[in-house]
């Protein structure tokens, strides 16, 4: 009995902070794999919307392809066919196309 109690007394418990280590590792992985890329993409989208100007060719979130004819604070006018323009919210503009893309479609 003396040997078993001496062995049990020499084993020290793990520090308390080691139980939180897996949670910290998971959070760091989520940060670098999910949160950070999303924040970067949102920043690029915001920058693209601020730089939007007349004559740019765009695609909206609904799949409408057209040329920007007027840019306001909250709305953008897009020409989808000759003499046909629609007004959409600026946030719905999803992609800025290279010049001349509409003619090649």
Image (cartoon, rainbow, N blue to C red):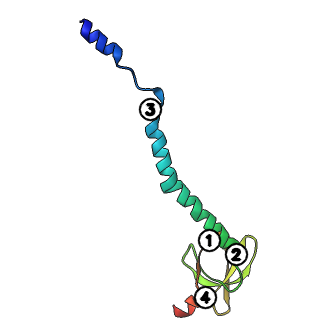
Instruction: Tell me whether circle 4 and circle 2 mark residues in contact (CB < 8 Å).
Output: no
Single out the mark in the foreground, 1 or 3.
Answer: 3
Single out the mark in the foreground, 1 or 2.
Answer: 2
Single out the mark in the foreground, 4 or 1.
Answer: 4
- The label on residue 18 is 3
Instruction: Tell me whether circle 1 and circle 2 mark residues in contact (CB < 8 Å).
Output: no
Task: Give the residue number, with chain letter if any, for mark 1.
Answer: 92
Left or right relative to 104: residue 92:
right
State how far apart marks 3 and 2 are (Cα): 48 Å
| In-front residue for pair 56/36 | 36
4 or 1: tag closer to the N-terminus: 1
Task: Give the residue number, with chain letter if any, for mark 2.
Answer: 51
Q: Give the residue furthest to the right.
A: 73
Q: Residue at x 73, y 82 (%)?
A: 70
| In-front residue for pair 6/76 | 6
**x and y percent of residue 95 in the render?**
58, 76
3 or 2: tag closer to the N-terminus: 3
């Amino acid at each position: 009995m003396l040997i078993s109690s001496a062995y049990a007394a020499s084993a020290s418990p793990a520090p308390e902070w080691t139980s939180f280590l897996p949670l910290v590792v998971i959070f760091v992985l989520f940060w670098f794999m999910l949160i950070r890329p999303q924040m970067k993409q949102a920043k690029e989208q915001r920058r693209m919307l601020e730089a939007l100007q007349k004559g740019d060719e765009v695609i909206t979130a609904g799949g409408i392809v057209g040329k920007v004819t007027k840019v306001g604070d909250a709305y953008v006018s897009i020409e989808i066919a000759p003499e046909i323009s629609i007004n959409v919210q600026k946030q719905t503009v999803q992609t800025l196309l290279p010049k001349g893309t509409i003619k090649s479609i």
